[in-house]
Image (spheres, grey):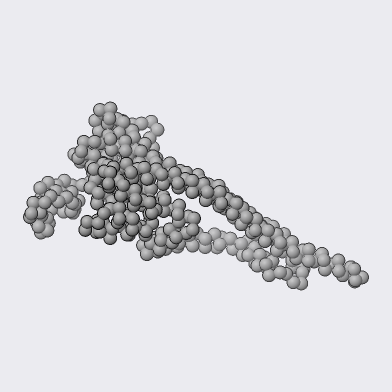
Amino acid sequence: MKKYRYVAKTEDGTNVRGSESAQDEEELYRKLRGKGLYLISSHAQAELERNRRLKKKELADFARELGTLLHAGVPLIRALAILAQAEDIRSYEKKILEGMLRQLRQGDSFSDAVAAQGNAFPELMVHMLRIAEAGGRLDEVCARLAVHYEKEHRMNSKIRSAMTYPAILGVVMVVVVMIIFTYVMPQFSELFEGLESLPASTKVLLRVSEAVRGGWPQLLAGIVLAVLLIRLFLRIPQVRYQRDRLHLGLPVVGRLLRRIYTARFARTLSSLYASGLPMLQAIQVSSRTIGNSYIEQQFPEALARIRKGESMSAVLGDIDGFVKKFSATVLVGEETGSLDEMLDSMADALDFDSERAIGQLIALLEPAMIVVMAIAVGFIMISVLGPIYGSYDAIGSFESMGV
């Protein structure tokens, strides 16, 4: 059975586009007639390739290079062939480009060839390329896509680099504690056995040390199993929804996430709208790129309100998860007729605010982790040295009594 993309007419003459599975075009025709549709044209889709998802930087480089070649007058197939023959191209990128070339030579459109590569390209790119083909502005849209993904890559890179130092501190903390439990504590265990009484904290540390030394394979397996179970648990839609909602309510992190989500939605909506996609469809596609299920699940109701005639700025202002000034920016864009420019400007401003907020957060997080590490190590050292000094005091008191 094949998957067909089709164009059909309803009984009132409205064009309808969609996809349907059928053995051949005759069966496709019968299925559509059963739905009250009259087939106009159709073509079989190739099965989706299993490709790895391209990173933001790779998407930006692909769009920029392709847009440059197309702007220079190079035909599309020739441009893709040039990119596929580049010396520094990775094997999986070459496979994707060759798959696209194969689809184009079979007569598919460029956007369908991109969509046929499975998860390699995001939905946003497919929609924008489909619009660009219809309007004959493929080079312009590729240039816009390059800017879009370059900004996303830059923001993600700054977040990763900002979290590097806290991550290193966390690893060092775990390593130090493990060394203390597996090497330092056993050195004192024989000494502690000769003492009549030990503080509760020392007893706990000794038991933990014995458990770590005697059952570290089970402990490691338990940690791995716990991580896997947590990941599976977080895949449950209801759990992910509550987790994403909780994130937005965190004191400092919540405000940062709201800026990041709003900037991501604004930039995506601006790109789609400027490319010619109808506003309702642009909002629908943009809502799936936010990265927060709690915010995304508010959009079906928001779209229904817009279809009823409510203003877009008022509806988006009621979305819980966006910064408050977002609706005011959309309102100005609606009134001035420059919505795409206002959204781009808003996204840039929020990105700048996010970078500054990330810097402030890391500036607070680093000393906090150092303090936590110092408290943990200090607690361990006091629990170890306390009984030793106590035994010395006892010995001194016995000597002073002449025992």
The image shows residue 1 at horizontal and vertical percentages of 19, 53
| Residue at 78% from the left image edge and 66% from the top image edge | 390
Which image quarter holds the C terminus? bottom right
Q: Is 3 left, or right, of 322 in this rendering?
A: left
Q: Image quarter for residue 220?
A: bottom right
Residue 174 location, quadrant: bottom right
Where is residue 216 drawn, in percent x and y? 58, 60
Residue 206: x and y in percent read 67, 65
Q: Is residue 15 above or below residue 403?
A: above
Q: Vertical placement of 277 versus 219: above or below?
A: above
- Side of 35 relative to 218 (left or right): left
Query: Considering depth in this image, is 14 or 8 the residue closer to the camera?
Result: 14
- Residue positioned 74% across, 64% down in the render: 386
* Of 98 and 373, the residue lying toward us: 373
Residue occupying the point 51% across, 46% down: 359
Using the image, determine if residue 34 lies above or below residue 362. below
266 vs 100, nearest the viewer: 266
Q: Position of residue 84 (x, y in %)?
A: 32, 34
Residue 354 in sight: yes
